[in-house]
Structures are given as C-alpha cells and as structure tokens.
Image (tube, rainbow, N blue to C red):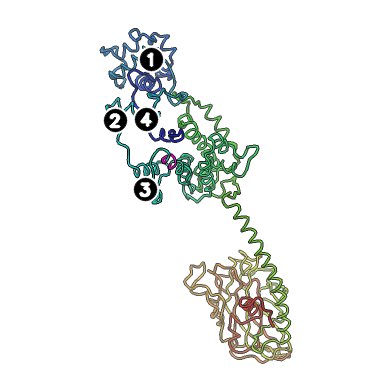
Amino acid sequence: MSKRHGVFLAVILTSMVAGRAVANEPVNFSQEILPLLSDRCFHCHGPDPNHREADLRLDQRDSAIEKGVLVPGKPEESELLKRVVSDDQDLIMPPGDSHRKPLTSREQEVLRRWIEDGATWGKHWSFEKLQRPQVPDPEIHPIDAFVLRRLQQEGLTFSKPANARTLLRRLSFDLTGLAPTSEQVAALDGSPHDEPYWEKVIEELLASPPHAERMAMWWLDAARYSDSDGFQQDAERQNWPWRDWVIQQFAKNRPYDEFTREQFAGDLLDNATDETRLATTFHRNHMTNGEGGRDPEESRIDYVIDRVNTTGTVWLGLTLGCVQCHSHKFDPISQKDYYSLFAFFNSIDEDGRAGTGAGPHIEYTSTLVADRVVEQQAYLDTCQQQVQDERKLAELRFEKWLEGFLAEPPADYKVWRTPTPVVTSVEGTEFAVEAEQIIQAKGPVPYQDDYRIVFRMPESMTQISGFKIEVLPHESHAGGRYSRNGNGEFTLTSVLALGRPEGSPAEQQLELSRAVASHNADKKRESTWDADRYYRIEDTLNDDARNGWTTEGIESVDPRLGLFQLETPWQVHPGDQFIIVLRHRSTHGNASIGRFRLSLTDELGEIVTSLDATSPILELIEHLNTDPATPLD
C-alpha cells in the first residue's frame, strides 16, 4: 500500500494503537510522569508560590535534584519515591489531608523505573517534537506492525479480512461520509479485489468532491462558520464564497503553509488576488451582535478576542480562555503573548456593527461562475441596446400616429379639456398655475380652507357634463404626499359646481349626481381620524363637514383621480364662467390639497365616470404589445 494510504489509515487507527507503555520500553515523561506530578504534587510543590510547601518545586527538575528529593539513576536514594511508597501516615505523599489519592502500585513502579532510567525531564506531550517510533516488524506495514504487537500483548490475533462490500462501505464512509453509490458497489463484481484494485478505489474516493467537502467540514466547524450572524436577530450572512474556497483548497490538496498564510494575511500578500483576500474570511466568521442596546465598541473587542481564541484552538492546539485573564501555570503562553496577538488582530477597520453593516466587505465573483457572469453581462448589454433602439422606433411611430390622430380624431374619442383657471381661497392660500394647468398651493397654510376655481368657457365648448380632479403628490408636501401640512394626507369634505352666464351677477348651483374615485380609503382601517366619517368620494356631494374623501390609510403615493358628473349638462356660451368649489372643512383640519389639476368634459354617458377611458397613449401601448413591428396607420 502507498504511503498516502498508510497515512490515511494511521489517522483512522490512532485510537487503536494508543495504550499503556510496555514494561521494557523507556517511560514517557509527558504521558506518564507529568500527569502524576501535576495531579498529586503540583498543588503543594508547583509553580504557585502562594500554595508552595517546604520551598520545594517538583515542576522543575533542577529544584527537585537540588533538594535531594530526586536522585537520577538511584530510586532507593530518592526521597520522592520513599515518600510515595511509605506506609507511615506522617510521611506518605501526597498526605491524607490533601484529598489526593495515593499512587497505585503500578504508578509507583512507573515512577521507580523513570528515576532508574535517569529521570529524564520533558514537556507536556503536546509541546514535544514528534519523533517516529521504531517499527516492531519492518517486514510488514508499520500500521500492521503496531497493531499486531498490541494484539499479541492482549493475547489476540487479527480478525478475518472483511468482504469486499464491507471494505468499500468502510472506505466510502471514512473518506466521503457517504455510503458508496450503486455504481461503485456494482463495480465490485468481477474485480480482482487485490491491492492495486483497492489503491485505485482509494484514489478515486480521494479525488471525489464529497471527500473535499468532508475534509472541509471539520475546518468549517473549527473556523465557527455559519450562514447567519447568531445572537438576537441571527440575520443571514453571505460568507458562503469562503466556504466554497475552503472546499476548493482541500480538493487541490493545497500545502498547509500556503493555506494558513492566505487565511491570516491573504490581503497583504505581494501578489494578492480576490481569492487570497477571500481567504481572510476565516477571521470574519465570528458571531456579530446587532442588539439595539449593545455598545458597538464592546462588540468590536469581543470580535478581536474571538479571533485570538480561535487562532489558539485551530493553529496552536490550545484553549486561551485562561490566559485572557492571567498567565496560565502550565501552558507556555503568557498573558503578554496573548495581548500581543490581540494587538495583531486589533488592526482591522471595523466598528462593532452586525449584519450588512459589519464591514469591511469584499465584492467577490466566484471563479466557478466568472465566465458565466461575463456571458450574462454581454447578453444584458445586448438586450439593453435592443430596448434603446426599440424605444427610438416607438417614439417615431408614436409621433406619426399622433399626427394622424390629431388631424382626424376618432368619432368616439372622449375629450377632457383643461382651460386656464383662476384660483382663490377663503383663508388666503395663494396659488401658482404651472405648466399643463397644474395648480400648486403656496403661501399661508390655514387649518381649514375653501378653494374657488373659475374657468371661462372657450368657444369650442357648448356644454359641461362633468369634471375631474387629479390630486398630485409633491416632494415639498408633508411626507412627500398630498398636503402641505399635517401628515401629508388630504380630506375633501364637499365639492360644489356653480355656473354664471356672461353678464349675469348671479351664480346658480349645478347639481352633481355622481362621483367616483381611483382610490377610496378602507372604512375599517386604523386611523388617527374617524375612520367611519372620512373615506369615500361620494360623501363630498353633501354639505356635511363630518365626512368626505381622504387618502388617510393608503400607503402608495400615486396621483388620486376623482370624477364628478352633473345631474344635467349645463349649456354654455363663450364668456360664461364655470366655478368649482373645493371645501376642506374636516374636524381634524390640516388636510387641504396642495397640488391638483381640474379638467372639464362636454361628453355624455360613461365618459364622465370612466376611470379607464381610452386614451392615445393606452392605444399605443396596446398596439406595441400586439404587433410592435407594424407601424400605426
């Protein structure tokens, strides 16, 4: 079997080969002696001067030898061994009142052998340099040799080889975390099942995407990767490109030093790329706190501490929670070392915010889709150019159609006309008549007001059958809506139509029979006003200020359209005046219309109350939707 396969199996079988030392092997200080001293002796004879007894330190070899407690090579002369094997309750160590168990006979023997071998000192096993052990039987694979030796110690032998299906299943679960596919199982039939065959199976599994995903899974867990922020809102975060990057690195079998360097400082490399900058997301996977009452600076410090502690657990194999507050007695990391590392991570330009506000950010396009993005952008550019070209053609077609329409309008075309108005008010509101006869209120903003709009009849009109009002929002209004004061909503309580013939001092009231609106407020809405009194346009036909038409409760900011029909068309002559009175007398006040336009019609029938009457632009849109390639005649 190849070295690559041997390394893999070594990882799987580590727990099988670990065990107690063999009697004829040297005693391992870090695994057998240091745990004994730490558990039974260091409380009274360790690094803490406040608890140290007899000025004796057993955590340092020189101190133990200097005091004569330890005589290397001579266990009989070593006071340490004498004390731990003593039956005298006044001499035995650890003493009974220390609440620590005496050494067992096996532990005593291990201690004796260690002293006899020279009391070789060392560090905790995790800080010792790895050394390859001597293989018991160099004729077979090292893994098999160590397993065989342990089995022999226990009086056991190897189990019978598993069948091919079981081996394949074990390999697949170990390498990919998934059961083998039906195709992989079927491939077993007719195969030799020899070593070259299994090497080929292992190579295929190692090269499969699921293997990279399985390997990346452990790294993602160590890096505290998540698709959300954690804490209160647990908002979604967009760190998944880094997850894909990690999977790609395992698939490529990247060298560990490069893998490490890019995740720590990929943005600072001389040849930094989007990929290396993306790698630094490792240290942005911590939870972020978006609670309203938090102190952002406190959160920022929490993020830095998280990066330091994660670096310790992932790269150093150490938990650094203790040294955050004090230098640990046994770990080789001091509090000064901890905050030196803290200073390194305290250099990121961030302010402790969470979610989309937790900068800095990187705009990243995955290499997996980069070509597709370029392709789609080219397609989008082509479509946008086609739209621009079609818009120009549509404008030309519209101009041609409009020219013919104005020269000979259809017989059924319903005309709205907007003569120039003269506008006054009872409470002193001023008005400006803008382009297209749009009326804009300005000047004083009274609590209530009546608007009076006067139209002098043109020669082209012989009767008036109705009129419409367009209430328009404007950025200068309260909330950018319909009124200059209050909450920006308007309430129209009454609408009157008056007529005064040319040369007559008297005005006659013209009865209105019907009113319809593009929008009416919901009667059941929650309102700061009286919801039952103000909501529909029909109520403007009476003279009751306690009801009327309003926009209160309607969220959209679109022009509001109201149509009014006269009971009987008023026959007019040139010079006659048609007068419209708009009353804003609601009990809540501050709801006068700020911007509007009035139009008149002489048509009869549904035109007066039709909100979707055919218009030139609607006809154009319908034509373009059905046959955009054919010009309008």
State left or right for residue 393 relative to residue 8: right
Q: Is residue 418 above or below residue 272?
A: below
Q: How many marks?
A: 4
Q: What amino acid is labelled 1 in the image?
A: Glu
Q: What amino acid is labelled 4 in the image?
A: Asp
Q: Earlier in the sequence, mark 3 or mark 4?
A: 4
Q: Earlier in the sequence, mark 4 or mark 1?
A: 1
| Residue 450 appears in the picture as rendered | no
Which of labels 1 and 3 is toward the front? 3
Label 2 and label 4: CA atoms lie apart by 11 Å
In the picture of the structure, the residue carrying the numbered disc 4 is 144
Mark 2–mark 3 CB contact (< 8 Å):
no
Quadrant position of the N terminus in the picture: top left
Is residue 319 in the magenta section?
A: no
Q: Secondary structure at mark 3?
A: loop
In the picture of the structure, the residue carrying the numbered disc 2 is 157
In the picture of the structure, the residue carrying the numbered disc 1 is 53
Residue in the image at 48% along x and 29% along y: 323
Residue 122: give x, y in percent of width and height: 44, 19
Label 3 and label 4: CA atoms lie apart by 28 Å
Q: What amino acid is labelled 3 in the image?
A: Asp
The magenta span reads 197-201
Q: Secondary structure at mark 4?
A: helix
Label 1 and label 3: CA atoms lie apart by 72 Å
Label 2 and label 3: CA atoms lie apart by 30 Å
The kind of secondary structure the magenta stretch mainly shows is helix
